[in-house]
Amino acid sequence: MSAKTGPGPALLRRLDRWLAVVEDNANLIAALAIFFLMFVGVAQIVGRKVFNVAIYGYIDWIEQSSALFAFLGIAYAQRLGGHIRMDITLGWPRRLRWWLELAGVVLALVVITVLIDASFNAFWRAWSIGDSTMDIRLPVWPAKLMVPLALGLLWLRLVLQLWGYTRMALNPGAVPVGVPKLETIEDHVKDEIAEVLGREEEPGRDAEEARR
């Protein structure tokens, strides 16, 4: 069987779809955490300036909530290839680029595995000693637990991408499954042209509508 029709891609596609649901929900929680922090920040400012009343334990709540939006969206960004990437390899051979992506995933897996172990130990230590914040004594273990959980989700995404990049490195002509599509120079140029034209067309459209 070819790489396009074999059972491997079908299973990979199914696992990618299931994991994407978890990543989307984790990213939604991160977005809601940002909205919560914005709401609390506005309430804190208005309360102090207008009513001279501050939110009890404001700093502690902000510190604990920041773990949500800081970590829960990283697997989602990895799936979409949304992290910072270099354009220097756009003109390189496609097979070489797939191998480079594979090497990057292997390195990331090693680093994330070490970070999961370290962050889980930090959570377990906080749980064991009953660690809490300085002001209102909030327990810190829930926030610290978010770190290994989010990194574990990223680890699963990297494992799927290890499979997907290995498949593409061995057969660059296959349909990408479970990995972001490689952008070519032509795609990059088209995106930049579309972005520039989109910015330039808006004033012209507004002027034309004003003349009408």
Image (tube, rainbow, N blue to C red):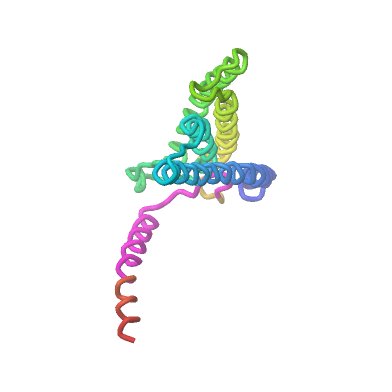
Assess whether residue 186 is covered by the magenta stretch: yes
Residue at the far front in the pictured view: 51
x and y percentages locating residue 20 in the rendered image: 61, 45
Would you identify the image quadrant in which residue 18 lies? top right
Residue 193, above or below 38 = below
Residue 131 forms part of the magenta stretch: no
Q: Quadrant of the C terminus?
A: bottom left
Q: Is residue 27 left or right of residue 193?
A: right
Above or below, 48 relative to 147? below
Please state the horizontal and vertical placement of residue 69, each as a whole percent of the image: 51, 39
- Give the residue furthest to the top: 129
- Chief secondary structure of the magenta portion: helix
Question: What is the magenta range?
Answer: 176-201
Q: How many marks?
A: 0
State the image coordinates of residue 3 (x, y, percent, origin top left): 61, 46
Viewer-nearest residue: 133 or 74? 133
